[in-house]
Amino acid sequence: MLSSSWIELDASAVAKNIRYLKKRIAPAQFVSVIKGNAYGHGIEQFVPLAERAGVSCFAVYDAREAHTALQVKSEHSRLIIMGMLDEDQLEWIIGKGVEFYVFTPQRLAAAVEVAKKLKRKALVHLELETGMHRTGIEEVEFPEVVDLIRKNRRHLCLKGICTHYAGAESVANFLRIQNQYQAFLRLKKELKKAGIVAEAYHSACSAAALIYPHTIMDMVRFGIAQYGFWPSMETKMNNLLSPQVKFTRDPLKTVLSWKTHVMSVKAVAKGNFINYGNSFLSTKPMKLATIPVGYHQGYAKNLSHSGLVLLRGKRAPVVGSINMNMFMVDVSHIHTVVPGDEVVLIGKQGELSISVASFAELTKTMNYELLARLPQQIPRVAN
Ligand SMILES: *Cc1c(COP(=O)(O)O)cnc(C)c1O
């Protein structure tokens, strides 16, 4: 292998998560959100696992991700671009039958023109502004949008009318989310009165579906939960303690682990500075192992002096700073460490595990950010 570390995906965890989540939202449709390189899991590797688990609709952020997904998804699976696309990409997007969000009248008009030219319907999801104030069609733009749709029914297929909540994973946003939900219902009715109805209405992400079941509607866009993570501790506790849900074991299983090998092992006498600078002084004779991963490979710099890895079934703490391509761990308490030993950066080894959550806690980032930043170059293998 050319890479100094690799990421393993647990196919049975994918199947279990998707089965559980589908049951929670039945009969609504499951949309698998695979933006951010499938939250770091790798679009190419994750899509086939999700399809085997019964998923037939995927959502990406932009045209580049759509391009990757098209290479690996089955012909029958749907694909939705929820975010960025340039108007000059509309031709191949509509030509390939990829669905996409429309959040301005301009994009709708551009889609109609391309659809006319290709003699192929544009498959659109109208994203409505309900209170997130990021993207979404404003109510004042409705007359223009309604007019465009009425005049171009032959060129458009309204696959969805949708919105997105501004932080359903946090109780602090409770009122804002409820207001968005009410706004969505009102705007849906208003469009219906104007004769505009969609095949499906959707609003929920993982947190919304798992905390506010009324937001489930016809489809749920599941991101983080399908990879085995609760969107927040609040979401997890809300589900753990809910009398309706009732589970004794966590139904969400972590899919990803990140592993590498020991690069070299070194004995250091008492009274020496370790690695760059003077931030770590050995106060006893120590044995140290060098790990061939650094911030270039996505191991955060602020894990200096605080990260943990698993080696020979034991925890080994990071000593000194995280370098660009390497860092060192204290293995004084582990007798038999040799170069080539497996090192777990995230995941299980023996009885122990390093969860993304604990890792994210240490780096003070959210699960989402840590996962999405795992470099694309790290090879992903499915087990
Ligand atoms: C990322 C995203 C989702 C999925 O969110 P999770 O919290 O990961 O479930 C759903 N909808 C939109 C529009 C998104 O951008």
Image (cartoon, helix red, strand yellow):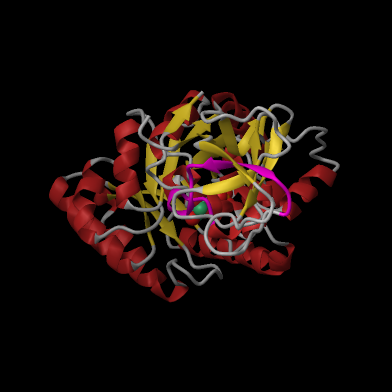
Q: Position of residue 101 (x, y in %)?
A: 38, 55
Q: Is residue 209 visible?
A: no
Task: State which quarter of the image contains the N terminus.
Answer: top left
Relative to 334, does residue 176 appear above or below in the rendering? below
Q: Is residue 81 left or right of residue 339?
A: left
Q: Is residue 334 visible?
A: yes
Q: Is residue 105 left or right of residue 250?
A: left
Relative to 31, does residue 111 appear above or below in the rendering? below
Of the pair 79 and 271, the residue shown nearer to us: 271
Relative to 375, does residue 5 appear above or below in the rendering? above
Q: Is residue 234 left or right of residue 34?
A: right
Q: Position of residue 120 (x, y in %)?
A: 21, 44
Of the pair 336 and 184, the residue shown nearer to us: 336
Relative to 82, does residue 56 appear above or below in the rendering? above
Q: Position of residue 121 (x, y in %)?
A: 26, 46
Question: Within the image, what quadrant is residue 219 found in?
Answer: top right
- At horizontal 23% and vertical 53% (from top left) the residue drawn is 90
- At horizontal 66% and vertical 58% (from top left) the residue drawn is 281
The question of residue 298 being in magenta is answered with: yes
Residue placed furthest toward the left: 117
Q: Position of residue 289 (x, y in %)?
A: 58, 40
Of the pair 326 and 374, the residue shown nearer to us: 326
Question: Within the image, what quadrant is residue 140 found in?
Answer: bottom left
Of the pair 254 and 67, the residue shown nearer to us: 254
The magenta segment: 283-300
Question: Within the image, what quadrant is residue 106 found in?
Answer: bottom left
Q: Is residue 109 left or right of residue 38?
A: left
- At horizontal 58% and vertical 34% (from top left) the residue drawn is 343
